[in-house]
Image (cartoon, rainbow, N blue to C red):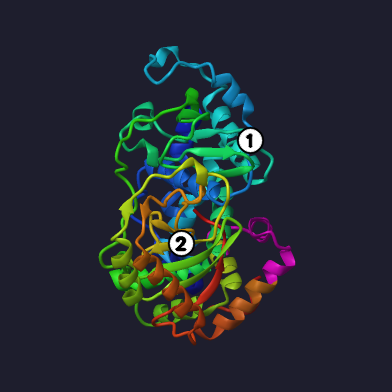
C-alpha cells in the first residue's frame, strides 16, 4: 500500500465510528425532516387517494384489525412523500393531516400532538398546530401504512410534553428572521444565546387559534447549538405577530412576554447592524426555509 | 417486510464505512454522520428503486457527499459545538511522515481530497466520475494536481500514476 493510500486509510479510520446508531434513529430523522420540509409553507393537497381511501376508516377506538390499508407499506409511504412534495410545490388545496412513521400507540399518546401532522388548508401547507382545527382530516400511518383517518373535530386537551425548551447553558444559537419563503440568519455567541434562552424560558404555553391559520407571518426562529450528530436541532420559532401564532410556526407553543419579544428584536438588530465580530455575533448568512 | 430487512442490513453493513469515507472528505465526523443518516433517510423513501441498483451503497455515498457539501455552514456550527463539547472520539495518533501527509491531505481543496479518497477506496476513474458527476478528465486532473501537491511527502514515483 502506498504512502498516500495509508494516509487516506488513516483518515478514513479516524472518522469511522465503532457502530451504527439504531435504525430507529433514521425513522426519527425522517419524521423530523418531514416536519422541517412541511413548515416551509406553500400550498396543499395530493394524496387524495390516501385520504379518501382512509376517510371511512374507524375512529381511534376501533380495533387495529379493522383498519384499512392503502397499498403496501412502501406505497403508502411514497404516497405521503408525494403529498409532501406536492404540498410544498403549491399543488394542493385540501386539508390533510398526517403522522408519519408512528405506531398507533404513539399516534394517540398524550404527547402525540407534537408529532408531525401535515396540514394543508386554504392554500397554506404547513405543519399542524397544537390544537385541532375543525374539519381537518387526520391520517395516521403505521410504518407507512395508513391505519386510521378521520375528520377530527376535537382533541383532548392534553399538555404538550415535548415542546422545545431553551437550553439553560446554550453553546450558541442561530437567530433567523423571515417567513416560509426564506430566512436570514446570524450565529449568536454563547453569551447572547444564553441571554436569549433565559428570556424565552419565561414564555407561557399557549393555544393556537384557528383564526391564525392562514397568513404566514414574519417570524424569528432560534436554533440552538449543538446542531451536529444524531440529534436534530431544536427549533424555536418566535412569533413576531404578537396576537397571532402563524400556522406554519408549529414549534411555537409559547406566548412570549413583551420583554422577551423586545429582546429578540434587539438581538436581531444588534446582530444585523454591528460590525461582525465572529466571536460574539457570528456571521450573517441566508438560510433555507425551515420549521 | 423483506424489503425493509434488506434496507436494515445495508444500513448495518455500510454505515460505519460510509461515515468514515465521508468523514475523510469533509474532515468532520459529526457532519459525516449527519450526512450519511440523511442519505439513508432519503433512501428509505426510494428503497424500492435503489434496491435494484447494482450498488445501493454507492447511491448512499453519493447522496451523503452531496449533503455534506451543502452543509458547510452547518459544518462550521457543528465544529464550534464539537470544540465546545470536546472531541467526539479519540482518533489514532500517527506520527512522523504520516502526520505530515495527513496534514497535507487535509489541506487539499475539497474536490481533490474527495477524489483521492474515492480512488483509495479502490474506485477506478470512471466510477469516481460517475460518483461525483464530473467528467473522467476532471477526475484525472484532480488526481494529478493532488498528487503534485502531495509529491514532496510521497516516497513513491508520482509520475506513473493517474
From this view, report whether residue A222 is shown above or below residue A59.
below
In the rendered image, the residue lying farthest to the top is A66
> In terms of depth relative to the viewer, which is nearer, A96 or A209?
A209
> In terms of depth relative to the viewer, which is nearer, A119 or A288?
A119
- Disc 1 marks which residue? A45
Residue at 50% over, 28% down: A139
Badge 1 density bin: few <14, some 14–19, many ≥20, Cα 10 Å:
many
Q: Quadrant of residue B48?
A: top right
Which of the chains bears the disc numbered 1?
Answer: A
The span shown in magenta is B119-140
- Disc 2 marks which residue? A221
Q: Is residue B16 one of those drawn in magenta?
A: no
Badge 2 density bin: few <14, some 14–19, many ≥20, Cα 10 Å:
many
Residue A160 seen in render: yes
Q: Residue B140 location, x and y as percent?
A: 69, 69
> Element type at marker 1?
loop
On whether disc 1 and disc 2 are found on a single subunit, the reply is: yes
Residue B120 seen in render: no
Q: Quadrant of residue A64?
A: top left
Residue at 46% over, 63% down: B23
Number of numbered labels in the structure image: 2
Amino acid at each position: 500500500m502506498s504512502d498516500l493510500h495509508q494516509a487516506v486509510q488513516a483518515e478514513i479510520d479516524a472518522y469511522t465510528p465503532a457502530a451504527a446508531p439504531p435504525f430507529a434513529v433514521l425513522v426519527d430523522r425522517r419524521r423530523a425532516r418531514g416536519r422541517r420540509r412541511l413548515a416551509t409553507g406553500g400550498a396543499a393537497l395530493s394524496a387524495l387517494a390516501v385520504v379518501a381511501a382512509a376517510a371511512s376508516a374507524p375512529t381511534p377506538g376501533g380495533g387495529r384489525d379493522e383498519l384499512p390499508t392503502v397499498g403496501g407499506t412502501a406505497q403508502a409511504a411514497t404516497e405521503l412523500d408525494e403529498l409532501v412534495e406536492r404540498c410544498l410545490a403549491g399543488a394542493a388545496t385540501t386539508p390533510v393531516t398526517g403522522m408519519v412513521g408512528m405506531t398507533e400507540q404513539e399516534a394517540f399518546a398524550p404527547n402525540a400532538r407534537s408529532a408531525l401532522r401535515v396540514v394543508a388548508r386554504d392554500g397554506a401547507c404547513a405543519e399542524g398546530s397544537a390544537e385541532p382545527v375543525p374539519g381537518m382530516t387526520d391520517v395516521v400511518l403505521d410504518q407507512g401504512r395508513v391505519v386510521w383517518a378521520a375528520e377530527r373535530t376535537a382533541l383532548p386537551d392534553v399538555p404538550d410534553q415535548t415542546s422545545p425548551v431553551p437550553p439553560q447553558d446554550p453553546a450558541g444559537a442561530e437567530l433567523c428572521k423571515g417567513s416560509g419563503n426564506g430566512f436570514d440568519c446570524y450565529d449568536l455567541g454563547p453569551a447572547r444565546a444564553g441571554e436569549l434562552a433565559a428570556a424565552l424560558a419565561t414564555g407561557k404555553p399557549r393555544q393556537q387559534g384557528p383564526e391564525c391559520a392562514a397568513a404566514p407571518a414574519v417570524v424569528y426562529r432560534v436554533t440552538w447549538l449543538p446542531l451536529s450528530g444524531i440529534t436534530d436541532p431544536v427549533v424555536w420559532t418566535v412569533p413576531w405577530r404578537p396576537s397571532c401564532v402563524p400556522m406554519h410556526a408549529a414549534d411555537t407553543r409559547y406566548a412570549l412576554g413583551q420583554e422577551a419579544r423586545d429582546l429578540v428584536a434587539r438581538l436581531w438588530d444588534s446582530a444585523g447592524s454591528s460590525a461582525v465580530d465572529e466571536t460574539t455575533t457570528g456571521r450573517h448568512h441566508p438560510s433555507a426555509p425551515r420549521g | 417486510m423483506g424489503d425493509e430487512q434488506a434496507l436494515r442490513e445495508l444500513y448495518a453493513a455500510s454505515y460505519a464505512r460510509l461515515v468514515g469515507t465521508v468523514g475523510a472528505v469533509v474532515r468532520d465526523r459529526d457532519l459525516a454522520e449527519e450526512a450519511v443518516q440523511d442519505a439513508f433517510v432519503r433512501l428509505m423513501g426510494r428503497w424500492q428503486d435503489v434496491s435494484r441498483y447494482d450498488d445501493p451503497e454507492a447511491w448512499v455515498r453519493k447522496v451523503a457527499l452531496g449533503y455534506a457539501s451543502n452543509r458547510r455552514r452547518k459544518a462550521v456550527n457543528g465544529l464550534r459545538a464539537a470544540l465546545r463539547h470536546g472531541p467526539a472520539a479519540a482518533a489514532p495518533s500517527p506520527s512522523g511522515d504520516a502526520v505530515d501527509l495527513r496534514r497535507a491531505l487535509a489541506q487539499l481543496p475539497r474536490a481533490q481530497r474527495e477524489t483521492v479518497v474515492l480512488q483509495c477506496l479502490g474506485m477506478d476513474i470512471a466510477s469516481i466520475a460517475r460518483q461525483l458527476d464530473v467528467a473522467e478528465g476532471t477526475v484525472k486532473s484532480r488526481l494529478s494536481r493532488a498528487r503534485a501537491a502531495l509529491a514532496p511527502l510521497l516516497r513513491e514515483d508520482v509520475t506513473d500514476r493517474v
